Image: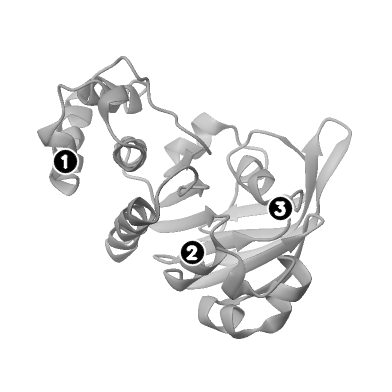
């Protein structure tokens, strides 16, 4: 689905990614972990066309998309859910969803998709006329994910979905991502809660200093003591 080949890039003259390479299979969940400053979120910005690529290639379904901008990536089925709260608090749930399809030419299709995603997230239908600020943190994150689904993404980039959420809400969000994977969506996620994220992922990727240090099945990484000792400052069991 997604392949990075020796990608080097960053912000202006500042290089963050230093020859990053990996491949993400279709209809899978892959979690990126690593120490602060490793370049985890920068990978998303590179894929989504939000920073300069100095060298290397990014392939999506075999097509070179190395220097495509966000609009072009969205057209190819890629969506990006950034870190933090990204809803418009004073707008209703319905109006927030409508914003997700504002750039689409076929607005009748957007309206149909809104109905479909509300079927996937019944809570949103129940609260569609409520202001987004009245939702819990977990419900707001569901709204962000639902909004990202309006354009039928094939690949979702999700940055720190658990940040600021209680353990119960984290599990709720992770269950949502698992359902999307089972429906055929490929998910690449950055997550600070390493143990919980790897437990629900198919694959794991460890970054350090902008380079891929380890990649493999999530269960294998969880069982490897080097993951905790070298990249998380302790055993992975304690990383949550």
Between residue 66 and residue 96, name the one nearer to us: 96
C-alpha gap between disc 1 and disc 3: 40 Å
Residue at the image position 89 percent from the left and 33 percent from the top: 13
Q: Is residue 103 above or below residue 37?
A: above
What is the distance, in whole Å, between disc 1 and disc 2 at their CAs?
24 Å
Is residue 41 positioned above or below 203 on the image? Answer: above
Disc 3 crowd, CA 10 A, few/some/many (<14, 14-19, 20+): many
Disc 3: which residue? 57
Q: Is label 2 in a helix, a strand or a loop?
A: helix
Q: Residue at point 15% right, 22% down?
A: 129
Q: Quadrant of the C terminus?
A: bottom right
Numbered badge on residue 123: 1
Residue 10 position, x and y percent, is 79, 39
Residue depicted at 44% across the width and 29% down the height: 86
Which residue reaches farthest top? 90
Dot 1 lies on which element? Answer: helix
The mark nearer the N terminus, 1 or 3, is 3
Q: Quadrant of residue 67?
A: top right
| Residue assigned mark 2 | 197
Residue extending farthest to the right is: 13
Q: How many marks?
A: 3
Which circle marks residue 205 in the picture? none
Distance of label 3 from label 2 (alpha carbons): 27 Å
Q: Nearest to the eye among marks 3 and 2: give it.
A: 2
Residue 4 appears in the figure: yes
Image x and y of residue 110, in percent? 23, 29
């Amino acid at each position: 689905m997604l392949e990075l080949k020796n990608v080097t890039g960053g912000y202006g003259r500042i290089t963050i990614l230093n020859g990053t390479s990996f491949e993400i299979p279709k209809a899978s969940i892959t979690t990126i972990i690593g120490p602060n400053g490793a370049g985890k979120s920068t990978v998303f910005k590179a894929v989504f066309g939000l920073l300069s690529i100095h060298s290397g290639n990014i392939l999506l379904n075999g097509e070179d998309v190395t220097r495509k901008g966000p609009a072009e990536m969205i057209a190819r089925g890629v969506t990006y859910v950034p870190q933090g709260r990204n809803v418009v608090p004073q707008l209703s749930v319905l109006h927030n969803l409508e914003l997700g399809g504002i750039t689409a030419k076929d607005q009748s299709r957007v309206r149909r998709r809104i109905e479909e995603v509300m079927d996937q997230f019944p809570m949103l239908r129940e609260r569609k006329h409520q202001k987004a600020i009245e939702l819990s943190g977990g419900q707001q994150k569901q709204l962000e994910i639902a909004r990202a689904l309006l354009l039928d993404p094939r690949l979702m980039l999700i940055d720190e979905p658990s940040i600021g959420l209680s353990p119960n809400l984290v599990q709720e969000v992770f269950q949502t991502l698992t359902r999307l994977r089972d429906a055929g969506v490929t998910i690449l996620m950055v997550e600070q809660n390493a143990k919980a994220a790897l437990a629900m992922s198919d694959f794991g990727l460890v970054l350090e200093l902008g380079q891929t240090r380890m990649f493999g099945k999530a269960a294998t990484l969880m069982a490897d003591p080097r993951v905790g000792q070298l990249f998380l400052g302790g055993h992975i069991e304690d990383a949550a």
